[in-house]
Image (cartoon, rainbow, N blue to C red):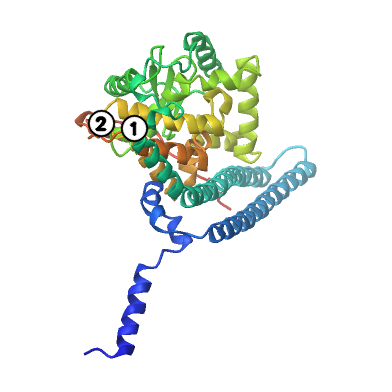
Amino acid sequence: MRKPAAIALLSLCAAAQTAAPSLDTLLKKSYLELVELAPGLNLPAKSIDDFRQRIEVRRKEDMDGLDAEKKRLQAEADDIHRQLAALNASASTDDAAMAKRRALLHCRLTRNQIELSQSHTERAMAIPVMYDHQLSKLDILAQWPARKQQIAAAIAAGHARVRHWGDIDDIGYRKLGQGQEGDVKLGEDAVNELRAWRMLPPDLDSRPIEAYIAEVAGRVAAASDLRVPVRPEVLATAEINAFGLPGGRLLVDAGLIANADNESELAGVLAHEIAHIAARHGDRLTKPTGSVQRMLFQGISMAADAFTGGAVGEARSAAHDYLGLGVHLNLALLGVNRETEAEAGQLGTQYLWHAGYDPRGFVRFYDRMAGQADHSATASFFRTHPPGGDRALATLSELAYLPKKEPERVNSESFVRVKALTEAWLKAHTSRPVKPQCAE
């Protein structure tokens, strides 16, 4: 017979094993995992609010660290410029020793500027995105249990299709995005301007890859509210992103294909972009500018400064090539803001489901990108698909509302073959900028 003390000890151990995970642990889990866990946790609202404040304190501490690092690099650059000025003041022309000294200072300055731009971008993106993901996940923990009950009650009462864009059986016949035909010129003008500014990477010249992307995009578009032909093109860049422009233009980075785990993930990102096009988000947000050229110029100029830390010359060019189009485009052209991202999350999920794909494809890809340690690799993606509680809840709610059915298509032999082709092309043609080694 067990002693009472031993029984009490066993009870304490069992309770410890079943205790709710800490919020730090929970926030490391994926969005889909949190949806499963949240209803059973019964977390006090105060603990969530207190943790939200802790996150803001941590964010400020990291941003202060970023500012200190930026000042250090800028001070280093100023010192190099002072040495160059002193060298220029010492003689009218360089002798061999001076020329060697000048080449060394130029090398150091280039290395400094590349480090400044890369560090600034990685930190400026990593810190806000990391903490925005944590805040979004806190929103799920706080709001999902009640949201799940509301959804279950609406379905049980026969009101599931009364929600905003809940008429899923009328996809393709809904009054959504009327006037898409008038957006074609806006999209064409944007592509032409990007090419004129040499901001658009060249097309990836591979018929098998292009044909496959056209097939997947066409399958999703046919199951959407798009009323104009979708016109995809694959860009020769390792950037991980896709861009839906007004009027049906769909720009797909080769890096997106290489980083998707299966066809439903790839289709999920394309569905999200097609949702932006179908709902005319880009047209809606570009109205105030009156000029595609002016809008692009402002977006490119501001983003170039914001994401390169003020770097110039070779360093700025290297940062642009590395980070990709997504960190330079004006978000209005893509129809990206808090409201439209939530709507595109809902609609894109519907289109995946309607096309026979696993409707969780986009969320699964999003979860994996959020878990990437190399934030510079995902800087473009999260600038154009920013984290937010509204967008996460909209997408997850739609997954709960949609009638359950076995997905017809999660992966395919075509995807496996095209992914391998794309990975081989990227390995042969792309590389990251490397800081030069400056020999003394």
Residue ID at (46%, 23%): 244
In the rendered structure, the answer to whether residue 183 lies left or right of residue 154 reads: right
Residue 187 horizontal/vertical position (percent): 50, 15
Quick one: 399 or 220, which is closer to the camera? 399
Q: Is residue 388 visible?
A: no
Amino acid on which the number 1 mark rests in the picture: Leu
Expressed as whole percent of the image width and height from the top left, the position of residue 397 reads 41, 39
Q: Are marks 2 and 1 in contact (CB under 8 Å)?
A: yes
Image quarter hosting the N terminus: bottom left
Q: Is residue 159 visible?
A: yes
Residue 368, given in percent of the width and then of the height, sits at 38, 45
Identity, as a three-letter code, of the amino acid under mark 2: Phe
Measured along the vertical axis of the image, is residue 44 above or below residue 414? Answer: below
Q: Callout 2: helix, strand or loop?
A: helix
Where on the picture, by quarter, is residue 85?
Answer: top right
**Residue at (34, 32) in percent of width and height:** 266
* In this view, 155 is above or below 19: above
Residue 88 percent location from the top left of the image = 76, 41
Identify whether 302 is placed above or below 285: below
Q: Horizontally, is 97 left or right of 119 in the view?
A: right
Dot 1 corresponds to which residue? 266
* Residue 85 horizontal side relative to residue 98, left or right: right
The residue singled out by tag 2 in the image is 415
Residue pictured at 55% horizontal, 18% vertical:
283
Q: Is the residue marked by circle 1 packed among few (<14), some (14-19), or many (20+) residues within 10 Å?
A: many
Single out the residue that lies furthest toward the left: 413
Comparing 331 with 76, the one in front is: 331
Of mark 2 and mark 1, the one earlier in the sequence is 1
Q: Residues within 10 Å of mark 2 (few under 14, many from 20)?
A: many
**Disc 2 to disc 1, how far (Cα)?**
9 Å
